[in-house]
Amino acid sequence: MNANKKLTQGIAMMILAAVLVCGAAFTADDQTGAPADVAVARNGKAGIVASLEQTENDVLDQALLADVAVEKTETQTVTIASKSEAAAGQEEKQAAKEAAKEAAEETEKETEELSKTEQEWQDKVMADVEDFLCIRTKGDADAEVVGKLYPTSVANVVKQGKNWTKITSGDVKGYVKTEYLLFGSDAYANAKKVCKKYAHVQTDGLRIRSKANGNAQVISVADKKDRLLLNKKADKKDGWVAVTVKAGNGYVSADYVKVKLGTTDAVSIAEEIAAQKAKEAAEKAAAATAAASAPAVTQHAATSASVDDTTLLAAIIQCEAGSECYEGKVAVGAVVLNRVRSGSYANSISGVIYQSGQFGPASNGSLARVLASGNISSSCRQAAADALAGADPTGGKLSFHRANGRDGLVIGNHVFF
């Protein structure tokens, strides 16, 4: 604005200077002109001077008006800009205020929830131990142990003492050493560190999907009261809870589960003894089932064989059952020897193996290649030795082929008949 004003004033001064120059010229003419023209010259000069003075005044007035207009325009521009900036600033302030309000409400909500949870934990304790803390019938290190408080176990405080604290947890009541306990908020903080989180299913037939999407593939189904382990490494998705099941990692709708810490109760000595007995009984039952389902191993008299026949037997085992379980390898060797002993086939290992139309590797050249390379695994050599020693998982079977539904004794991928 100051630059515009100075420019206007400069123009006015230039015009004024021109007027003064003209006036001087007229004065000189008046002093040297003819008498007859005096009156006319004076009047004419007076009129011109008056006109120039008026012109000067008009120019100055216009300059002042222009200056005022410039100031007014600049003032209006500044005013408009100020109003625009003020409006923008007000909007930013309002947005910031609303964001701060939302953050405060969220924090308040979290604080309320945390406070509620912490209040629930005020009368609870956990054992700050690696293995377990003994619960005794009374506050005495020599008193009978009635239970154990494990690292994930939570107990309610009945009466806190300097040295011993009386607690109750599950079906166990008794005393524990106070120095090994975490109380209230400390217990809650510890629970979040040592306990896993689970989603407790609230409905039957809850679908577990591969992705956090209602149209994603269903990898498993859970029923009411099932407990699903939370997958802490998965990305959080609104409305979904990430879980881990036997079928893999997936998601369940948050509307149908409740997420809780996987805390436990103390275990009484009676419960521990019962659990140990149940475990031993289950192991015995499993062993008995496995023994009943396992094929009976027939023990034949040992068969003598030359080094070449032993190598040949190991080679055919390599060709027929090189990728099978060890029992399957011995079974193939036993079939060869069962044929030797049967009287229905050749009475030698080489005669049985090379009998026309019997063993494919003998006719297609693969057996010859294995023998030539000497590439026979130690397990196949050992299986040949066991078969020669009389071991027979097949129970005397004379034939085998790939398992394809045919009746017979299945060992690995072969059925023996």
Image (spheres, grey):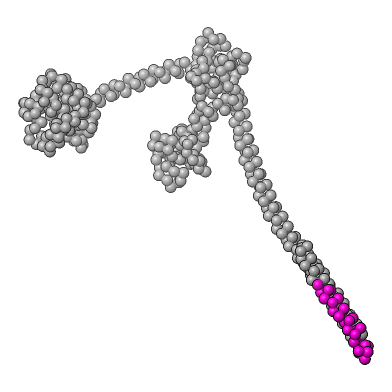
Q: Residue furthest top?
A: 142
* Image location (x, y in percent) of residue 40: 91, 88
In this view of the protein, can residue 326 be seen by the observer?
A: yes
Corner quadrant of residue 63: bottom right
* Image location (x, y in percent) of residue 300: 14, 20
In this view of the protein, can residue 201 be seen by the observer?
A: no
Task: Give the camera-side residue of 230 and 377.
Answer: 377
Q: Is residue 305 left or right of residue 326?
A: left
* Image location (x, y in percent) of residue 380: 19, 27
Tell me the quarter of the image containing the C terminus: top left
Q: Is residue 55 left or right of residue 101?
A: right
* Residue at image point 77% right, 67% down: 7
Corner quadrant of residue 386: top left
Q: Compared with residue 37, is residue 267 higher up or lower down, i.e. above or below?
A: above
Q: Compared with residue 318, is residue 68 higher up or lower down, i.e. above or below?
A: below
Residue 27 located within the stretch drawn in magenta: yes
Tell me the quarter of the image containing the N terminus: bottom right
Q: Compared with residue 210, is residue 347 higher up or lower down, i.e. above or below?
A: above
* Residue at image point 39% right, 17% down: 277
Image: magenta residue range:
14-41
Q: Residue furthest front?
A: 32
Q: Main secondary structure of the magenta part?
A: helix
Task: Give the camera-side residue of 372 and 107.
Answer: 372
* Residue at image point 54% right, 17% down: 173
Residue 213 located within the stretch drawn in magenta: no
Q: Compared with residue 344, is residue 211 higher up or lower down, i.e. above or below?
A: below
* Residue at image point 55% right, 15% down: 176
* Image location (x, y in percent) of residue 148: 50, 17
Q: Is residue 139 left or right of residue 12?
A: left
